[in-house]
Amino acid sequence: MAIVPLQKVTFYGSLPDRDAVVGGLQQMGCLHLVDLSGQVPNKPLEHADRNLVEEAIRHLEASPVQNANQRQQYKDDLNCLKVAQLALEHQKLRDEFSDRRDQLHQQMDTLSPWGEFRWPEVHETAGVRLWFYVIPERELSILQNSALVWQLIRQEQQTAYVVILSVDQPDVPWVSKVLPQRSLSDIQTELVAVDENLETLHWQRAELTRWLVLLRRDLNEADDLLSRLSAVNATLADQRLYVLQAWAPKKQIPALREFAKQNRLAFTTVAPHHDEQPPTLLKNPSAVAGAESAVTFYITPGYRAWDPTWIMFLSFAVFFAMIVSDAAYGMVFGLGLLLLWGRLSATADLRRMRNLFLAIVVATIGYGVLAGSYFGTTPQSLEWLQLKIEGKALAGNKDAMMMLSLGIGVFHLALANVIMAWQQRGANTSWVAIGWALGIVGGYVLGLFAQDSNKAVVWLAEGLGQARETFQPQLKLAGQWGLGIGLGLIFLFSSNRPLLSAKPADWAWRVLDGLLGLTNVSKAFGDALSYLRLFALGLAGAQLAVTFNNMAESMQQIPGVGMLLAILLLVLGHGVNMVLGIMGGVVHGLRLNCIEFFNWSLTEEGHPFRAFRKKAA
């Protein structure tokens, strides 16, 4: 199990020493604090200055140009809050100028068709006003046959731009346009000034980024201070003594006991009581720890549950590979990972994600080689690497792919129930989980070998020769027994009432509970069929790749630019297909694990272990 065993630890000390002790425990960084104050637990303190600094850091980190000359101390007239205020004032100005530039561009787009002109004052035209209309060109005859004074300004794409001179709004079947009350040249002049201001602000922002190191340091120190204040508020205290309680990893108990001894504290430890729900701390090797975030994205396993990180790591990589189903795409992903390798090695969290990405790339390339797909084609020199069934490549054998996808789903769900049976061993529910595992596998085997004409028998039994005639009946019988025993266990053990009760009412309720338990057959059937999405999405991606290749081959016949268009289509087409493959692999890979698999194997949800630790270096 990768769920770290915890102990509840309690410190008793003198109230004047509380702040120093809390600071020391924060330095150790191995405790999940328990709130003894009776207030709302785990409610973070709000601090206006902290929020201001955090917002300033986000603004400066988003700067496209970073000042490499990072400062290690502020100037005499600057401090953390002043720098943050400068950054936020800069952000406000930048937003205002950006909004104004958008407005000016919109005004230019509106005025451009009408050209350069100056709006006359009303007294200059004796009350005559300008009315602007954009009308269909075919309706110009309406103006030509009227007594109105008008002028055609522009004609384009069967549209006419017309100005009518009139004191009152003309009686015409069109709606007049409202134009900005300024000339096009004035707008262009202001736009130049706005762009110059934005350019100045751009470099001012880059200049302010030299303070990012100090701002981050001060923000971490502020967080540490707030965290200590929260920890102090969570203690139970009177006028002389205080009590601080927390959950700690079992292996940290010796270090905590030594800390208590050095600080003259009373210290006790106790194992979690059966009715307590300690936080869940996951601990996995760095090679697979990247899947922890995929697990906790959907659910945090309960403390007494099990950690599915290993299974998530392996199954997510396999599901992703089956959905992408192309070795060349996997090589492109690998090239992208290689380019980002340095950045993904910066921190421990990024290194764990890097390992997960590496497993996905390896699985995608490996499955793509077995499927024999390289950008939707199969080079003759690589055909020997294909997995062939009935003489067909795996990617081209739809029946085999459907049975393979369904078989993976059956194995995945059966594994979930086996794990559930082990977790709940000794209880009736463990026999129910065993029943579902047997029933799901038995139903799958029975479905495969129920009919002589089933094509699945051919590729499963291929190469067995004379044994083929005995192979199918035996497996069919095994499927029948598995399904029957599985459903029987579900019916018998779905109830918590005594199995050997002498009360007729208990037997009646057991029958009812058993029948209710069997209603989940439809759920099991639907969840197993859900894994057919591996086949469907893989087939869709493969067909798209082939389609783009065929279109590119046709475009090559175009004289002159045919080759260029074909290359462009291949790049864009396969690029879109890879993006769709990534989206499908992530969404459906997570779905099959987090919904289908977890629903059968994780029934207890917990809350994460949040270490009380120091952020600032």
Image (cartoon, rainbow, N blue to C red):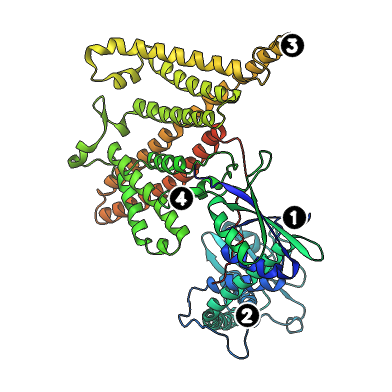
Of 18 and 195, the residue lying toward us: 18
CA distance separating discs 4 and 3: 51 Å
Residue at the far bottom in the pictured view = 76
Q: For residue 118, what is the image quadrant?
A: bottom right
* Mark linked to residue 505: 3
Q: Can residue 183 be seen from the camera position used here?
A: no
Residue located farthest toward the right when viewing the structure as drawn: 239
Kindly indicate whether the residue at mark 2 contacts the one at mark 1 (C-beta within 8 angstroms). no
**Along the line of sight, the residue nearer the viewer: 262 or 475:** 262
* Badge 3 element: helix
The residues bearing labels 1 and 3 have C-alpha atoms spaced at a distance of: 47 Å
Q: CA distance from mark 1 to mark 2?
A: 34 Å
Q: Count residues near mark 3 (Cα–Cα under 10 Å), then give few for <14, some for 14-19, many for 20+.
A: few
Q: Nearer the viewer, mark 1 or mark 2?
A: 1
The residue lying at 71 percent from left, 9 percent from top is: 502
Q: Real-space Cα distance between discs 4 and 1?
A: 33 Å
Amino acid type for the residue under numbered disc 4: Ala
Quadrant for the C terminus, please: bottom right
Does the residue at mark 4 contact the one at mark 3 (Cβ under 8 Å)? no
Name which residue type carries label 1.
Leu
Q: Which residue is mark 4?
A: 289
Task: Mark 3 vs mark 2: give the one in front.
Answer: 3
Q: Earlier in the sequence, mark 2 or mark 4?
A: 2
Q: Which mark is residue 36?
A: 1
Q: What residue is pinned by disc 2? A: 80
Label 3 to label 2: alpha-carbon separation: 74 Å
Rendered location of residue 351, percent (x, y)? 42, 58
Compared with 581, 560 (above or below) is below
Question: For this view, does 587 lie left or right of residue 268?
Answer: left
Counting residues from the N terminus, which is met first, the one under dot 1 or under dot 2? 1
